[in-house]
Image: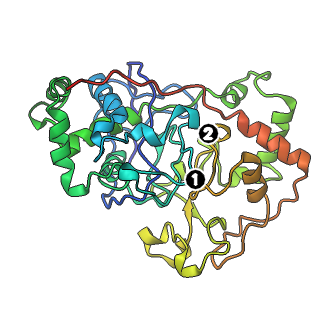
């Protein structure tokens, strides 16, 4: 995959992607990302420009349409769930529950992740099974999150597109293509690409504002990059090595295996790659907004940030595929407190704003 940065001139409300469920999508990654007219969000900050696919260029009208669709529960099978339902402001734009609940009150198997900066990601879902935001949107919409069913997406899109306010927008944005499963996914994905978190206190500190972090937080930053070795996997500026490779990076850190029979363990990435070395391995999540988005890990099994830090700085849970990167780092209580304090400096200042939805 080739990424070419572009710059997007208009200013828009930031938004999130529909993730965290167990819906399936086998669609692959777009073959190339090319420059488009206008400018992409995030061009001037520490993260660089958001990659934009050549076959889905950003426009203000398309993003505005995607913003509405992202918040519209009428897209779901029973009118109870929108994309936003799993990524609300009060939950740090991750999930409040250990594992997500989809349309029709379906209990899903994984936690809804924080998705600030989702437009930079190379793959989506905890196991990386979707290769583009567009494919991920269709997967969540047709799968358990929204419950529509993959074969019913065009019919649901036509139903949404028949609402007068939406009808005008789909015609203006997509012309003769109208409202289809593809155009709905393209609009939502475009909106998600405007979700940028690049002005945390950490970012201000790295830009030269020495007062942006307290002494304790600065000590935590030193530990993060040094003794605790967090930066090995949670690499700045995204605080995840996931963003550095085309297919993403996946590790077994021992979560979800304790006391679980081996044949009942969520195999994670192995279900996609079919490689034994990916057994019970999951993507490295970004730590941006981590302090605001408990609970943690792919199964939401860890309730507090302090517990998560202690786990990741400890020996983990032994299993047949535990990554050697998990080891006891010998942190003191004071050092754990400093790390937790530093992670608080990664809290994103923005929030999602609900738009007015078309009636009908």
Residue 154: % across, % down? 17, 47
Q: Secondary structure at mark 2?
A: loop
Q: Are marks 1 and 2 in contact (CB under 8 Å)?
A: no
Residue in the image at 65% along x and 49% along y: 234
Identify whether 8 is placed above or below 272.
above
Q: Which is more toward the observer, 266 or 270?
A: 266
Residue 1 visible in rendering: no
Residue in the image at 28% along x and 34% along y: 57
Residue 206: % across, % down? 70, 29
Q: Secondary structure at mark 1?
A: loop
Q: In this figure, which residue is indicated by the disc labeled 2?
A: 288
Left or right of 88 on screen, residue 295: right
Left or right of 48 on screen, residue 344: right
Q: CA distance from mark 1 to mark 2?
A: 19 Å
Q: Residue furthest top?
A: 10
Q: How many numbered marks appear?
A: 2
Quadrant of the rendered structure where residue 29 is?
Answer: bottom left
Identify whether 125 is placed above or below 254.
above
Residue 187: % across, % down? 29, 35
Which class describes the residues within 10 Å of circle 2: few (<14), some (14-19), or many (20+)? many
The dot on residue 8 is none
Identify whether 12 is placed above or below 95.
above
Residue in the image at 45% along x and 37% along y: 16
């Amino acid at each position: 995959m080739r990424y070419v940065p572009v710059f997007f001139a208009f200013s828009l409300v930031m938004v999130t992607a529909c993730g965290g469920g167990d819906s399936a999508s086998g669609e692959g990654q777009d073959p190339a990302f090319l420059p488009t007219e206008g400018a992409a969000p995030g061009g001037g900050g520490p993260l660089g420009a958001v990659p934009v696919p050549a076959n889905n260029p950003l426009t203000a009208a398309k993003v505005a349409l995607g913003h509405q669709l992202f918040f519209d529960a009428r897209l779901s099978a029973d009118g109870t769930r929108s994309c936003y339902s799993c990524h609300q402001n009060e939950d740090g734009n991750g999930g409040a529950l250990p594992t997500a609940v989809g349309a029709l009150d379906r209990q899903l198997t994984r936690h809804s992740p924080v998705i600030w900066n989702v437009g930079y990601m190379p793959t989506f879902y905890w196991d990386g099974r979707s290769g583009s935001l567009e494919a991920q949107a269709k997967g969540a919409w047709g799968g358990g999150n929204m419950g529509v069913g993959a074969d019913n997406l065009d019919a649901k899109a036509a139903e949404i597109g028949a609402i007068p306010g939406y009808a005008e927008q789909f015609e203006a944005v997509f012309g003769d293509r109208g409202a289809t499963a593809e155009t709905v996914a393209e609009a939502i994905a475009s909106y998600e690409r405007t979700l940028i978190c690049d002005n945390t206190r950490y970012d201000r500190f790295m830009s030269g504002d020495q007062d942006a972090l307290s002494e304790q937080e600065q000590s935590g930053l030193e530990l993060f990059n040094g003794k605790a070795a967090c930066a090995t996997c949670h690499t700045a500026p995204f605080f995840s090595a996931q963003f550095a490779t085309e297919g993403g990076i996946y590790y077994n850190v021992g979560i979800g295996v304790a006391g679980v029979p081996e044949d009942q363990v969520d195999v994670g990435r192995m279900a996609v790659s079919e490689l034994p070395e990916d057994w019970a391995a999951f993507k490295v999540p970004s730590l941006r907004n981590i302090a605001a988005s408990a609970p943690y890990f792919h199964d939401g099994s860890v309730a507090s940030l302090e517990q998560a830090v202690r786990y990741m700085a400890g020996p983990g849970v032994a299993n047949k595929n535990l990554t050697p990167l998990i080891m006891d780092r010998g942190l003191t209580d004071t050092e754990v407190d400093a790390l937790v304090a530093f992670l608080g400096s990664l809290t994103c200042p923005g929030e999602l704003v609900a738009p007015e939805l078309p009636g009908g």
